[in-house]
Image (cartoon, grey):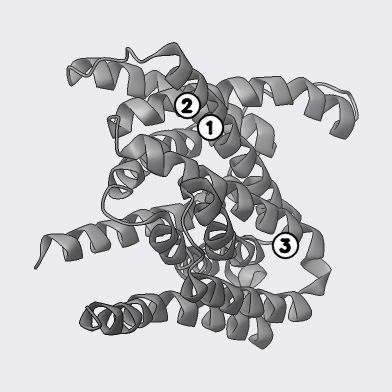
């Protein structure tokens, strides 16, 4: 097995873990903002000592730290919308909306990296959007949750594009540490605002149920510390668009897991699964089409 294939399988394993996060979000009883608050708190509390134990210095230029903290607020907003979408709609609808990440990346990456547009990326992103449209037509009663998931996908794509620059310069766990600190601080700011507008008593629900703690720790340490640190490292091996396109498999993994965990509550219409298959087609066709378009160009020289 080649090194690139190992990295590719590692990427799919991470996406499988992310497919499980929406299920964990449904299992936890506290609201989405409080859930992200604890997830990011436990994540950076583990990452800090882990970096020190590995002999990694946490010292960075103040400007870089500021950029990482701001990037952390992006991922915090992404998670808040993500978990809220899974509760407003269903886990399956939430994950289908997240598949639009490839389209957002195809639009954001050229602007951020100042490179020309790649029509293959835009085309496959539009195919994913077509699949999302099919899902929307058959699951219109979940329109609010689907819209929140699409907004969450935009923030996830923005996070990946920004992170690609940091991944080539700094250690993955150091990057993730500062981003989790930023995500925690951003969520802490959101808590009173969210409580004032959306809670009847205007008080945040900061006390999880006893059974919540296990799921929160799994989210923090497995789905965040491990998965996001590994994803930052993989940004050195793959372009952000290739990673986000593979993340489109998250609905496939997540929907299957959701049916196993929640049963009939997660069984959707035939149109939903048709739309998901269209999204999957865009994922699987990318490596082949990319090779087909690059080889003629290479032969021309």
Q: Which residue is mark 3?
A: 146
Q: Would you say 107 lies left or right of 68 here?
A: right
Q: Which residue is mark 2?
A: 68
Q: Based on the displayed image, in which of its 4 quarters is residue 285 positioned?
A: bottom left
Q: Which numbered marker is on residue 71? A: 1
Could you say where residue 243 lies in the image, as x and y percent from the top left?
A: 40, 58
Residue at (55, 51) in percent of width and height: 111
Labels 1 & 3 near each other (Cβ < 8 A)? no
Could you say where residue 6 lies in the image, as x and y percent from the top left?
A: 17, 61
Q: Is residue 207 something one can see in this rendering?
A: no
In the image, 159 versus 300, the foreground residue is 300
Label 2: which secondary element: helix
Labels 3 & 2 near each other (Cβ < 8 A)? no
Residue at (75, 59) in percent of width and height: 147
Residue at (43, 28) in percent of width and height: 43
Farthest residue to the left: give it: 1
Could you say where residue 114 lies in the image, as x and y percent from the top left?
A: 49, 50
Taking 74 as reference, is 148 above or below it? Answer: below
Q: Quadrant of the N terminus?
A: bottom left
**Between marks 3 and 2 in the image, the one whose residue lies nearer the viewer:** 2
């Amino acid at each position: 097995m080649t090194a690139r294939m190992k990295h590719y399988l590692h990427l799919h394993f991470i996406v499988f873990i992310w497919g499980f996060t929406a299920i964990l979000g449904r299992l936890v009883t506290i609201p989405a903002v409080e859930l992200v608050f604890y997830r990011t708190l436990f994540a950076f509390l583990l990452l800090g000592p882990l970096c020190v134990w590995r002999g990694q210095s946490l010292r960075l230029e103040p400007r870089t730290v500021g950029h990482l903290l701001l990037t952390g607020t992006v991922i915090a907003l992404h998670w808040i919308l993500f978990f809220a979408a899974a509760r407003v709609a269903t886990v399956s609808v939430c994950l289908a909306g997240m598949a639009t990440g490839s389209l957002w990346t195809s639009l954001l990456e050229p602007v951020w990296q100042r490179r020309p547009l790649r029509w293959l990326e835009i085309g496959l992103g539009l195919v994913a959007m077509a699949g999302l449209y099919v899902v929307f037509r058959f699951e219109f009663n979940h329109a609010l949750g689907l819209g929140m998931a699409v907004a969450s996908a935009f923030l996830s794509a923005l996070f990946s594009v920004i992170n690609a620059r940091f991944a080539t310069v700094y250690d993955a766990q150091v990057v993730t540490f500062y981003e989790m600190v930023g995500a925690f601080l951003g969520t802490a700011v959101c808590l009173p605002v969210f409580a004032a507008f959306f809670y009847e008593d205007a008080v945040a629900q900061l006390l999880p149920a006893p059974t919540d703690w296990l799921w929160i720790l799994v989210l923090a340490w497995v789905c965040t510390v491990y998965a996001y640190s590994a994803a930052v490292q993989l940004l050195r091996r793959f372009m952000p668009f290739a990673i986000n396109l593979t993340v489109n498999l998250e609905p496939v993994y997540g929907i299957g897991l959701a049916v196993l965990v929640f049963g009939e509550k997660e069984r959707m219409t035939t149109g939903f699964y048709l739309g998901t298959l269209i999204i999957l087609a865009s994922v699987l066709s990318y490596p082949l089409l990319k090779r087909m378009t690059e080889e003629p160009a290479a032969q021309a020289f």
